[in-house]
Image (cartoon, rainbow, N blue to C red):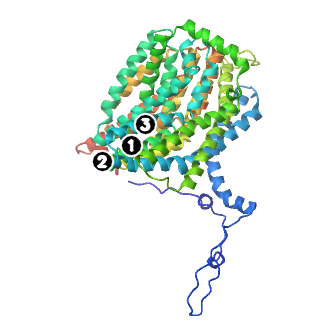
Amino acid sequence: MSGAPESIRYGDYLRAIGAGRQRLSYNALGPTLGRDAQGRARPAPATAPIRLRPDEIARLLQPYVSVRFADQLKAVAPLALYLALFQVLILRQLIDDSWLIVGGLFAVILGLMFFMEGLKLGLMPFGELIGQRLPRRSPLPLVLLITLLLGIGVTFAEPAIGALQAAGQNVSPERAPYLWALLNPWSGALVLMIGASVGLAAVLGTLRFLYGWSLKPLIYTALLPVLGLTLYGASQPELAPVLGLAWDAGAVTTGPVTVPLVLALGIGIAAAAGRGDSGLSGFGIVTLASIFPIIGVLLLTLYLAATLTPAEILASAQAVGAASATLPWSARSPWVELLMGLRAIVPLVVFLWLILRWVLKEALPRPREIGLGIAFTVIGMCLFNLGLTYGLSALGGSAGASVPAAFMALPGAAGSPLYRYGVGLSIAVVFAWVLGFAATVAEPALNALGVTAEQLTNGFFKKRTLILAVSVGVACGIALGLTKLVLDLPLVWLIVPPYLLAAVLTWLSSEEFVNVAWDSAGVTTGPITVPLVLAMGLGLGNATGAVEGFGILCLASIGPIISVQLTGLWARWRLAWQARAAGHAPATPSALGAELPL
């Protein structure tokens, strides 16, 4: 195994560790100690609390805040600039309310900065503590019940779930009545069903940790009802528009709250059972949490179709429209975003605290630090919701609504179509491909998965290879999703064949590659990518007259599953071929990883 060590600029290192310090003598920090008549050192007198001036507080916090602000700025700014420049330079369209969008994006950056820091200081210690102590003090059924409830709670706390709810405002009840009902009056039930599905996935994934089950049979077992319900829904004209929402729901759930909290509990349970040293610990829950919500949303749709007719939904929509002129203050912006932030975090914190006090009978460790972290999480979620409304959704919607001007005439778009149909459509597809590639390469969770995959395969599957394979897969999926919206292709024929191909590749691939490939589909959909892509799809769907704009996210998820497994199979075939050429028997990837890393 070879490769140069990763380098880092000395200036970046100093900034990361909070440099900008001043060297002080230790004697200047403490009181001067005196001695008594016998020459013994007197105890130091009690010191008053240290009081700092505002400028000193600012100097202390500046390195800490700037690093975290820069992390989120790097994630948001390139994508926002790409969308804005593409719209202005290629599509020759101005961005409406540009200053409002800039303010919204700034709120997104601040919100994510507070949220991620609060998650680390406040919520994660809860999850880790419960994950370590609960399995040792409670029977397995109670542990699994708490895992199920935790899966529901973390789904409500996902930042991207708000984007799903906000998407309901753009759906026409006349053209897609059941989709409108799910995203408006039934939106609470929708999130609850998605959460219950995530909870069930967490329970099954935990049992997998405990008993060392292979992921392959679980994938096949989960895919059967998913594909069966999808084919049935596609055969019913009134249910077909819901398919995109159902498949996209699986991509929304695996965000920065669900994955670490549920994994902390699952791995804690596995460690308590003596299985925490398995190299596959941590894999599988993300995969199942991506598949089970599809089943949940489709089952909820069937229940809705059995209890309500399209005519009743249309009457309900008209009643809502008449009442919308007199919305209460709690349903108007910015109060609705602030209340959504409180509703997402506070119930989850109360649930975790009750588990700690009533089940584990322990006090809260470091209450001030954890309390500060929870406060950061709430502030961050509220700011993110505001930024979602005025920044990410507005920018994604504007870009999506402008892209069709490249190849078709749009009302209000001067000079459209800007290019000949074939050229304009090609430009739109390339735009989507580059957007997907850039958004995935910058995804921090993918970098972490790359490190894990490299360790799991003994260096055979390099981090950069995984990032490249996943990014290409996501980019192709988003480009295919845009093509689906433009050409109004049935989603079922874009979903079922790729998943059947993924199932075949799963059967051919080794367990390590199956785990990495299927989990990579879940980690690519972060809190920035999901709102942008959802809003872009809905804006594009409205501009082109499509019934709905969902489906891009799920196509972005299947892409990396196929690309990573194909990369693994190609590498294994190359190893086997080289072994035969050298006159030796084929060797396993892990055994030859040191000789031929990817």
Label 1: few (<14), some (14–19) or many (≥20) C-alpha neighbours in 10 Å: many
Label 2: few (<14), some (14–19) or many (≥20) C-alpha neighbours in 10 Å: some
Indicate the quadrant where residue 293 lies. top left
Q: Compare marks 3 and 1 and give the one earlier in the sequence.
A: 1
* In the displayed structure image, the side of residue 504 where residue 54 appears, left or right: right
- Disc 3 marks which amino acid? Val
Residue drawn 46% across the image and 11% down it: 306
Q: Does dot 2 land on a helix, a strand or a loop?
A: loop
- Disc 1 marks which amino acid? Gly
Query: Relative to residue 373, is residue 411 depicted above or below?
Result: above
| Label of residue 286 in the image | 3
Q: Which residue is mark 2?
A: 273
Give the camera-side residue of 598 and 498.
498
Residue drawn 58% across the image and 14% down it: 547
Q: Which residue is mark 1?
A: 266
* In the displayed structure image, the side of residue 380 where residue 349 appears, left or right: left
Query: Relative to residue 351, is residue 315 depicted above or below?
Result: above
